[in-house]
Image (cartoon, coloured by chain):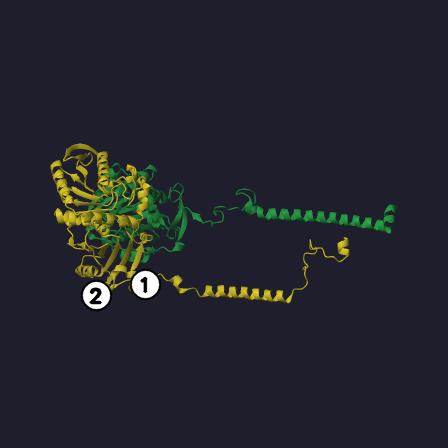
Chain colours: A yellow, B green
Amino acid sequence: MSSARRNGNDDRVFVRNGRRPYRRSYSVAEVRWGAVVLVFLALVFFWVAWKGGHPDPKLFTTGIDPLRPGSAAVRGPLGGSLAPAGWTEGAVSEYDTSNVYEKIDGREDYYRAYGFERLFFLTLTSDIDIAKTIDIELFDLSTAANALGAYAGERPGGITPEISSSGMAHVARNALFLTRGKYYARVIGSDESPQVLDALARLRTSLEGAIEGEPLPWAYALFSGRLGIDPGKVTFLLGNAFSFDFARYVYTATVDDDGGRLFVSAARDEDSALTLAARFNAGFLEYGKGEAVRDGVEWVRDRYIGRLAACTAAGPWVIGMKGAVDLERGAEELARLRSAVALLPGETHRLALEERRADESRRGARAEGVEDGEGNLFPGEGGETERGGTDER
Amino acid sequence: MSGDRKRVHSPAGRKDADTADAARHRFEERRAFLKRAGVAAVLAAGSTWPALAPPGWIFSLRDPDGKRGAPKEKTFRLPEGGFIVEKPATAADLGVARGTDIRAMIRSAVDGIGGIAHYIRKGDIVVVKPNVAFERPALLGATTNPEVLAELIRLVKEAGASEVRVADNPIETPENCFARSGIREAALAAGAKVYLPSPADFQVLNVPGAALIEKWPFFRRPFKDAAKVIGVAPVKDHNLCGASMTTKNWYGLLGGRRNQFHQKIDTIIADLALMLRPTFVLLDGTRVLFRSGPTGGSLSDVRPGRTVVAAVDSLAADAFGWEDLLRRDPGRLPRYFAETAKRGLGNPNWRETVIRETRIG
């Protein structure tokens, strides 16, 4: 036995008998605080248990009542009920870029290429025959140019759309297609019975009343207003025009039955337009060889399809012709376009740039412009940085 | 020892004894301390070893990327060699039937590749996979023609199949897709069972050699005990891969976030050909969605094809569909044809194959 133990002087370094508490009693204050902690823990336990048994109902709601027509919150531009007499609406469902594949997997990339934002979907069912249905697919494509571009891309050749000041529309057998401002609607009947076609006609009126329109983009004034080309033959290509990755925001207009197309795009200034036109020409030369120079413009014959193409700058505009069957006709069309562009007021150019910038900004494409290595919001035009200046916009 | 006694009885000796006792006590305490500290250190090291030892070391439980701790999904494989039944040597590679009598066309097309009795045995459980991807009426050509499906089911049952299961995992709501396409009603009327997918029906399928879906959720339930598998797919334009026909049709058996595969659509289609080797396929060219696919919508995008094609080689059937039914340039076949052929999973040169074509009605 050590002297420390013999003397009753407790060794506080080690507790010799681990099963015995070091202290045999606790103070009243300690007991009280212990009780308080235990009560608190018990309360936490019961609170967790109660919350588990009574979850917040909002956790289980999707915002859509499947038994009723969509609420105003999810009807978006559809407004009030669209169902014509004799038809009943189902619920409205809404899709955005994160889940649109759940509705149109395999096709969604087409609409993404035209600035897809949201899709509103609604089915109408006939009260007389439930096999007769009409699906309304309303795409928000962020700009009128995109909506018209997507519409033109899906419109079969040979169909002439009906044109209003704020959009286009046509009926193809069982289906109605229309644009209204930034919206593109596909209204698809289950068949082409009189009952369905009658409902389509009434739905067109309802949709045109419900969705606010906006004037057609500037290029329609150029191609249709000044050159007299059918507006239905004007197309907008948001990106990858003619399979050139630098070619964006290009409007085209078909000018002949052979598919020859004039095109125009707004560059930020004359220098940029020259740079961009040179890139178009270089692109054409990758697929063919120069055949002639007319009015200072080199025409390139495509070695695969045998057609001619040319591009040049006209002030801050880039203009061109693609798919011309013969040089004379192509040069004549390009000269017409050059003259028409020369008469465009400066305000049109400003509008074109604004339209483009707004879309780039919204889509986060500014970063893509940087990534193209040119520090340039307008890929393909070159940039002030290339010419040693600033790239301020 | 006497000297010790002396020291005990003298004050100085007692003091010396106390000093020695204290020294001995300190020595004992130090030894006990070191012993216990050693034990504690060993225990501490032992207990932290599993967590701190590098992965792969003995007793190591270290899991820096969380993969070791992730739940291990049970995988399965489809039968080795798939569900293939070699066609008779004298049979054609493509059985093509044209006309308007769907019942006769299907029988004639299948007869062309050796007849249904060659492929289906009495008592077989047969899975039939139509394309029910979208909630569209059949007239619009985005889904398999229900009449074609029904006649195929009847033919298989006549051959002695004990059970025919119709299954697909549509893109849109399964109940709505099966109802509006007319597939559900046609399948039930013809005597088949309809399998709509639910989350519990999927299990991870192991496809050795697949580039993208080596392990991927697969709609397994209808395949339990199945002996034969038949695909029946429409002929459709496809926005991403050019055309969707019998090979792309197997996409409808995948679960999970399969849309991500659209980034590599040609590779996934080649993987699908590897994933499922069917007994035979039927290309439903009664309607052709030649534009605005794969969803379609307008009857203007659909033309009557009045053709069905039976084949063991789905790639050959698809190549036929591309040129003959979609009327597209055979020199510009979508890339998945080459990718699939490169893996030895089909022959896209359908003109090199033996074709038996009949016209009915």
Q: Nearer the viewer, residue A356 or B319?
A: A356
Q: Position of residue A29 (x, y in %)?
A: 62, 66
- Are dots 1 and 2 in contact, CB under 8 Å? no
Secondary structure found at label 1: loop
Mark 1 crowdedness (10 Å alpha carbons): few <14, some 14-19, many ≥20: few
Query: For this view, does A326 lie left or right of residue A3?
Result: left
State the residue position of label 2: A86
The reply to whether residue A106 is in sight is no
Q: Quadrant of the C terminus of chain A?
A: top left
Q: As displayed, is residue A81 above or below residue B168? A: below
| Amino acid type, callout 2 | Gly
Q: Quadrant of residue A270?
A: top left
State the residue position of label 1: A66
Mark 2 crowdedness (10 Å alpha carbons): few <14, some 14-19, many ≥20: few
| Amino acid type, callout 1 | Pro
Chain identity of mark 2: A
Q: Residue at x 49, y 49 (%)?
A: B69
For residue A151, which numbered disc appears in the image? none
Q: Quadrant of residue A279?
A: top left
**Precedes in sequence: disc 1 or disc 2:** 1
Q: Which residue is farthest front?
A: A389
Q: Position of residue A58 (x, y in %)?
A: 39, 63
